[in-house]
Image: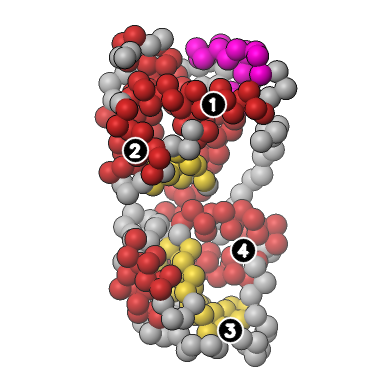
């Protein structure tokens, strides 16, 4: 069995970085933002001068680009899933970690080659896996670059949201609801709100049901606990109302389970879904609401996947 030292430079970098990424995900219950993973790898892994070099064409650090490039292999193998800037370790990926860093890379790359043979018009063309001069597989290079750019963009948006105070974040949530077609006659002022931060109606008079009672928590770092969801449930009149809980961070596993099992409908929106919804409904907002979280769309050549 090969060790990491027997691999080519790029593969050796990929093997140790992706294995460390899996260890980080495993310690975080299987999910974490791509940016946080890269930041932790930077602190926890020792890199050579070659790995720390910056590409002139892109400005990216070599080991970071290699990690993004090979992460696609792990995704094709079903070991890793990426969505909206979040990396998810699958049960198959956690089981495959037992193989060790080198064998994990080997099986992931094998899965990628199988996928490539089934989906590309020229499957016999070999893939040059030594970064940075990859010419043979521009599709994967392009996909890895787009993943990197997307994670940077989402990270920037989240950082902007994090800097807002709780009332500014509350206004942002209300703006999103308006863009989605809801009316927001009540947005809690400073002070005690009785547990409800926003009330949203489907029509201007609030005649149509169900009406939405919204709880907003600006917790970018700490997960929202089940107790907070339980408190919102106590404010909902079954049948005529539904609950919506929005956070700038994430929910604990217990909070998510409580919402699923509640006898009233409670929808949870975490920071990732909030950003996704803001992007989706951005063009439906007025200029004042857009200014709460301004975006600038940039278009790249897409992938055939």
Determine which residue is flagged by label 4.
Answer: 289
Which of the 4 image quarters holds residue 302? top right
Give the label, 3 or 4, closer to the camera.
3
Q: Residues within 10 Å of mark 4 (few under 14, many from 20)?
A: some
Q: Position of residue 29 (x, y in %)?
A: 32, 49
> Residue at point 30% right, 26% down?
100
Q: What span is in magenta?
A: 123-142
Q: In the picture, which quadrant includes the C terminus?
A: top right
Q: Quadrant of the N terminus?
A: top left
Q: How many marks?
A: 4
Q: With respect to residue 80, does 121 lie above or below?
A: above
Q: In this picture, is 80 found above or below 113? A: below
Identify the mark nearer the N-term, 4 or 2. 2
Labelled pair 4, 2 in contact (Cβ < 8 Å): no
Left or right of residue 228, residue 109 in this image: right
Q: Which residue is mark 1?
A: 112
Question: How far separated are the C-alphas under marks 3 and 4?
Answer: 25 Å
Indicate the secondary structure of the residue bearing disc 3: loop
Q: CA distance from mark 3 to mark 2?
A: 44 Å
Q: Name which of mark 3 and mark 4 comes first in the sequence.
A: 3
Q: Residue at x 61, y 63 (%)?
A: 289
Percent coordinates x, y for residue 254 in the rendering = 32, 65
Residue 131: in magenta span:
yes
Of marks 4 and 2, the one in the foreground? 2
Of label 2 and label 1, which has the lower sequence position?
Answer: 2
């Amino acid at each position: 069995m090969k060790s990491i030292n027997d691999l080519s430079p790029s593969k050796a970098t990929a093997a140790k970085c992706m294995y460390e990424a899996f260890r980080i995900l495993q310690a975080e219950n299987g999910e974490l933002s791509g940016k946080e993973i890269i930041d932790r790898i930077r602190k926890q892994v020792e890199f050579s001068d070659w790995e720390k070099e910056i590409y002139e064409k892109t400005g990216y650090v070599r080991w970071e680009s290699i990690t993004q490039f090979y992460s696609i292999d792990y995704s094709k193998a079903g070991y890793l899933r990426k969505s909206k800037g979040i990396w998810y370790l699958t049960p198959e990926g956690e089981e495959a970690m037992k193989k060790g860093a080198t064998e994990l890379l080997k099986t992931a790359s094998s899965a990628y080659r199988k996928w490539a043979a089934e989906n590309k018009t020229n499957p016999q063309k070999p893939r040059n896996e030594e970064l940075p001069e990859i010419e043979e597989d521009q599709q994967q290079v392009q996909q890895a670059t787009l993943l990197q750019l997307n994670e940077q963009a989402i990270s920037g948006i989240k950082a902007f949201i994090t800097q807002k105070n709780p009332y500014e974040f509350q206004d942002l949530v209300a703006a999103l609801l308006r863009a989605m077609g809801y009316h927001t006659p009540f947005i809690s002022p400073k002070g005690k709100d009785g547990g409800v931060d926003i009330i949203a109606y489907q029509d201007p008079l609030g005649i149509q049901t169900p009406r939405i009672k919204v709880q907003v928590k600006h917790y970018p770092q700490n997960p929202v606990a089940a107790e907070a969801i339980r408190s919102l449930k106590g404010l909902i009149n079954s049948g005529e109302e539904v609950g919506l809980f929005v956070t700038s961070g994430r929910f604990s596993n217990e909070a998510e389970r409580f919402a699923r099992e509640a006898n009233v409908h409670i929808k949870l929106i975490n920071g990732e879904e909030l950003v996704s919804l803001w992007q989706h409904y951005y063009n439906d907002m007025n200029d004042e609401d857009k200014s709460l979280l301004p975006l600038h769309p940039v278009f790249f050549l897409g992938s055939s996947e």
